[in-house]
Amino acid sequence: MKAEALLLFLALSTPALAQGFAGMGEDAEGFSVPQAGTELVFPRDHGAHPDFRIEWWYLTANLEAADGTDYGVQWTLFRSALAPSEGQGWQSPQLWMGHAALTSAEKHRSAERLSRGGIGQAGVVEQPFAATIDDWHMTSRAVASADSLSSIDLGASGQDFSFTLKLDAMGPLVLQGDRGYSVKSAEGQASYYYSQPFYEVAGTLKLLEGDVAVTGKAWFDHEWSSQPLGADQTGWDWFSFHFDSGEKLMGFRLRDSAGGFTSATWINADGRAEPQAPGALQVTPLEFAEVAGRSLPVRWQVKLPDKKLDVSTRALNPNSWMDTQVSYWEGPVRIEGTHAGRGYVEMTGYE
Amino acid sequence: MIRESFIVLLSHWRRKPLQLIMLLLGLALATALWSAVQAINGEARASYARAAAVVGQDRLESLVQSDGSRFSQQIYVDLRRAGWLVSPIIEGEKRIGGERIRIIGIDPLTLPPQARQVDVMGAGIGLKNFITPPGILVTSPETAQRLEGAALPPVAVVDTLPPGTAMTDIGIAQSLLEVEGQVSRLLLWPTQPASAKPLEETAPGLIRRQPAVESDLSRLTDSFHLNLTAFGFLAFAVGIFIVHSAIGLAFEQRRAVFRTLRALGLPLRSLVILLAAELMAFALFSGLAGVALGYGVAWALLPDVAASLRGLYGAEVPGTLTIRPSVWLAGIAIAVAGTMVSAAGGLWRLWNMPLLAPARPRAWGLASERAMRLQALSGIALMVVTGALTQVGSGLVAGFAALAALLLGSALLLPPLLSSLLKLGSRTARSVLAQWFWADTRQQLPGLSLALMALLLALSANAGVGTMVSSFRLTFTGWLDQRLASELYVTARNQDEAQAMRDWLVPRSDAVLPIWNAETRVEGQPVQVFGIVDHATYRDNWPMLAQVPDVWDRIAASEAVLLNEQLARRSGLGLGDPVALSNGLSLPVAGIFSDYGNPKGQVIVSNDLLVKNFPDANRLRYAVRIDPAKAARLADDLRTAFALPLENVIDQASVKSFSLRIFDRTFAVTAALNVLTLGVAALAIFASLLTLSGMRLPQLAPVWAMGLTRRHLAGLELLRSIALAALTMIVAIPVGIGLSWMLLAVVNVEAFGWRLPLHLFPLDWVRLAIFALLAAGVAAAVPALRLARIPPAQLLKVFANES
């Protein structure tokens, strides 16, 4: 769940924000609303859901060059619908936004693309899977019998960087929350949400300094909804961790005027998901830094007592600021403590 | 002391309120006309700048087809998919309820920041409303008003767009313009990703176009605005004559006061500073009033100027004025500068005045013999400069310099010339009274000369511009008869209807001639290409200026092209020169035709050639030849048969009257400025006569004492003014002819791109002369009336005061 999509959605569509319609099936403007108990069906649900307001295909990769240098790569395609329908040509109410970033300890490079739906400049095709905007792409090269996301090619370019990566999944898709129904607040806001956290990555980063061959791990999220946040929720902190043990953790905290709302999924090395009860995950900022004119936590303590997890994160580059139209912090981290590993942290809504 | 002195100095104006009014009015009028022109030019230039900045075309490179035609939006998608940061633009014109509106379609999501003039996401519009049907048309407030009631998408208003332009989403624009799936050009973001594939691979048909630093419009209209500016200057110069005479009078009449103040111990420096302060206060006051008045004049003239600019150049200028601080500052500055220049002489004389100089106004005439000779020499020198400039110089600046030299030179020559004429006149005198009349008129000449020079400027400008406009109109009317030879002009609404209409018309008329056209660029300029068929209509009537012998055969054989005069002049192409049209097609020029009132360059080719080389050509218009007596009937039948709107079938007479209406509006501004200038000149005479009348009592009193009645004297005064005006008018006519020749042969060619023959209209001069004499008579009436009613005691006092 990525909150900047919410902000984009706020920026682009009409101010009337539907609230508290959970369970009604549709909100005031005719958009569909996630229903508990709905079964996700693949490959159909890899594709776009134009009857929902917002949707994203989100990939983060922790990479390493042959000389041990750490890199992080982000690739995201957002969809934001002005109306719950698809149309031909420029009349389509579907808008697309791409974000890409390439982070090293010295520099965080980011790029952004916007596009209308309906004219062939951006969109998502289910079969064979392809998510594209401009020359950015996430394309399936899976064999017909396998899940179409089990093997993908990924590419994006900005002013001063580009990358092409090959990703192969070593485990199954993971449904977040209740079989893919992920609750976001005590009031019941929710989304459909599944992940593919088991990618092994190999590919090339093209920098102004030259090409760098890299390998590593990647995490893919696909999420869609129409009513992502509660009224008093101001932003959030999101964590995706690859532990050296092969286990994974997805966790987030939605900040509000009270103590916030946390949720997490523990993913065993074999892909078995263990959704955690709301509030089980505890996250605490350890250290703040001045980033893009505001104070942001650059080290976190993350605890999950049931799993005897107590780790802290260290950002590869504390300045991993996405200087896009809707701006936020997103960057690779190292994990230390009871479990070691690497992962990604995202922080939004810090003003 | 200073305070008291200032009050004493100012008390003069309380006793002579008319003089004060004259001074303030003269200054305010001069400033007003100048400011009006500045305000109009400022408005127009701001409008061009807005037009140039539309979708950032003044700052961004774009990708276009070499001939400027539209292309598939798939090329846009291909370029984006190849990594190029480009944004599509569709442009076109649409007639909406009789208004021609330029529609610009943008994609707000990919539009570069430099091109964002309209905040689509902002309040009042909203992205959703903008991009989803029915969409939103964003226009200037004025355009929104014009579009009121038309069956269109809802309109939102912004101040940043030029008039006549509507910005909307590209999808909405494509439907409005009926060009689904097409774009006009692609805006390039200033920086492109290093990884983008080469342009030639992805879009081989497109070329990069540099940002247009200066818009076509501002270049085309430059000379028009220079014309207005010249008029503004002329008006200001004429106004300053009034100021000069009013200030001169006030100085002369206060000599006694100055002497007394100095004798009482006021330092000379303080006196000069006080007078300068007084004038500065007047200048500021009249400057402010003048600019305000100027805005009034500009407000009244702007609709005509806007119509002219639209008619001449297709330039859209709003009919409403914005208050610009620069106009206020410039107006006040020029008022102050003008006052100081006018007062410099007076202040200088005061500075050098001996403390106990006689307080009586000195006779103006005595010292001026030498000055007049000097003036005559300068005038002759300026005339030589005028001649040299017309022979050697080229371009608009040289043209205007020659105009200025001609006007100034003849103004300087006027007093010596009048003096000689008066000397000649005095030889005819038989009686003593007549002798005195001639001599006294000559004596007064130096005092009146400035006012008469102002009158000369105004009269010759009137005669010159009038001759130019009338010559133009005569030529234009004749040209319309040639150009509009066909009886009916019809426009179909679509291709099928055009074909059906042609089939319907052929058996019912003598000939149906296609008027098909396409847009392209020649030598970098946008031009229209027209295709014509071989027909007597063209062979017999077309208004050719230059042609090769077998011109029509060569056009019919698709071997050559015709150019209109403005295109030939702007691009420097002549008979026989090759013209590169699109697609590598290049043909020689076989003829050049006159094409008045058209802002664009035009090329005429055979219809076959047009169809073959410009597949996108507009093929909806036809000219129909038929017996004129049957034309109206055929027009009615055609409208009924195809249910055509009224404006789709136009008869020759309507086109002609429409064209002449545009023409007349074009020069309405010139006419208005002319009348205003003449009014200012009349005021100058009035001010001068008023100045003189106060000083002339010592000269008139002896004549009165010898038995001439006051009434008789007043009559002579009136006669004198009229005679001087008449003489000035006689001088003004040749100057005016010179002026109009320069306007037609030099300025017009540069400003509009066409040269016109000079025609003379003596009846206009007679009318002008009557007006001038009337103006002089009215101006002289007040002083004359005063003289007629002056108490005899005051005349007697002249002898009593004489020492």
Image (cartoon, coloured by chain):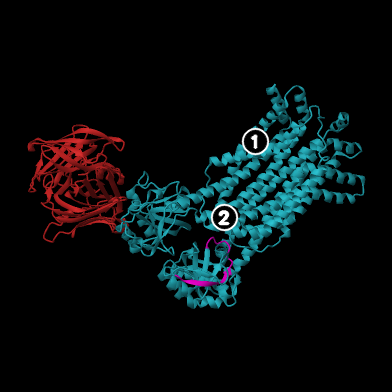
Quadrant, the C terminus of chain B: top right
Q: Position of residue A215 (x, y in %)?
A: 18, 51
Q: What stretch is highlighted in magenta?
A: B584-600
Choose mark 2 or mark 1, whichever is in front.
1
Q: Is there one chain holding both mark 2 and mark 1?
A: yes
Residue B297 makes an appearance in the image: no
Pointer 1 residue: B283
Disc 1 marks a residue whose amino acid type is: Ala
Determine contact: label 2, label 1, CB under 8 Å: no
Q: The cyan chain is which one?
A: B
Q: Quadrant of residue B784?
A: top right
Q: How crowded is mark 1: few (under 14 residues within 10 Å), some or many (20 or more)?
A: many
At x 39% / y 53%, what residue is drawn?
Answer: B168
Q: What color does chain A have in the rendering?
A: red
Q: Position of residue B504 (x, y in %)?
A: 45, 75
Mark on residue B308? Answer: 2
Mark 1 belongs to chain = B
- Give the structural element (helix, strand or loop) at label 2: helix
At x 75% / y 36%, what residue is drawn?
Answer: B249
Quadrant, the N terminus of chain B: top right
Camera-side residue: B364 or B370?
B370
At x 30% / y 59%, what residue is drawn?
Answer: B82
Mark 2 belongs to chain = B
In the displayed structure, does residue A309 sit left or right of residue B177? left
Q: Position of residue B476 (x, y in %)?
A: 62, 63
